[in-house]
Image (cartoon, rainbow, N blue to C red):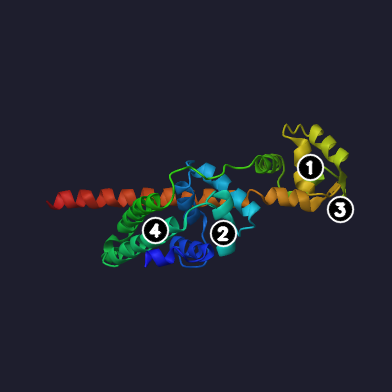
Amino acid sequence: TQAARSHQPRKILIQRIFNALDERSDGFLGPDELRKYAEQCGFEGDDDAWAIEYAEMCNDYNLNARKGADLKQFEKIFDKKAGQASIEAQDLVDLIEDTKIGVANVRTTNSEVPPSRAMVTQQSFKRKMSQHYTSRLSRAISRKKTWVAVSRNFEVLRSFSVFLRARYSDTDAAFEGFSKKPFGRLTKAGFLKSLERLEYDGDSESLFRLLALGSTYIVKRHIKWAWNLLMAEELVRARAQRRATLRQRIDTLRAQEEAESDDDE
């Protein structure tokens, strides 16, 4: 019973939520699956804002950008980034049960769809799933917005990554902008001086601290790491663009089918 499940260890309940959210059943929550959860915890941004949020999670929780979060990583996101560390056990159980029912209903209905209408109906069912998911989750999670905004530290690192990519073609060229020696080392003073010469207007002191992570030097791998910080963001933006293109094709197909239906009448 649900009452009995509410007495299960919190770790088990979070795992059940993870499984309910894992629509692809591949053991990972990708950016789209995580966004659905994030929105119920208070995230309200658009596709561009979500791309940045996802990039931060990839950095902070060491996610594989293409696969997403595994269970252990989701547990950390659940407690920290989503701010759900204090959610009650019964609320977790409600979420698990409602999510299972919603997914099962959509799958059952979708199996009855004629193949000729698969493209159009697939999108409509996904939309219904999203709406149903919102209704389910709102009953299980407090309406208090708990999603934690992008941190100042990540904003500093991201601004530097954007700066590098706007100015240089690759990481080799980027490091050469700071040092002519391929395997050179930059002291803090040398790094800050180079930033000033390059007219970088960000927080240089914090940037050195975040890049060096306790070291007294900046080397090429630090610049490469900063460069790659945007990879997850780019992946999410590309997926959003593909979805927009697909929606456009589906809308066109739907309009054509409606026009043909009117002609038949």
Q: Is mark 3 on a helix, strand or loop?
A: loop
Q: Mark 2 points at which residue?
A: 75
What's the CA distance linking mark 2 and mark 1?
A: 30 Å
**SS class of the residue under badge 1?**
helix
Q: Which amino acid does label 1 sit on?
A: Phe
Q: Which of marks 1 and 4 is in front?
A: 4
Classify residue 193 by image quadrant.
top right
Q: Distance between the residues labelled 1 and 4?
A: 46 Å
**How much space separates mark 3 and mark 4, taking CA atoms?**
56 Å
> Mark 3 or 4 closer to N-term?
4
Q: Earlier in the sequence, mark 1 or mark 4?
A: 4
Q: What's the mark number on residue 183?
A: 3
Q: Are marks 3 and 4 in contact (CB under 8 Å)?
A: no
Image height of 121 relative to 229, above or below: below
Secondary structure found at label 2: helix
* Nearest to the observer: residue 219 or residue 97: 97
Q: What residue type is labelled 2?
A: Glu
Q: How many C-alpha atoms fall within 10 Å of the one at disc 4: few (<14), some, or many (≥20)?
A: many
Foreground: disc 2 or disc 1: 2
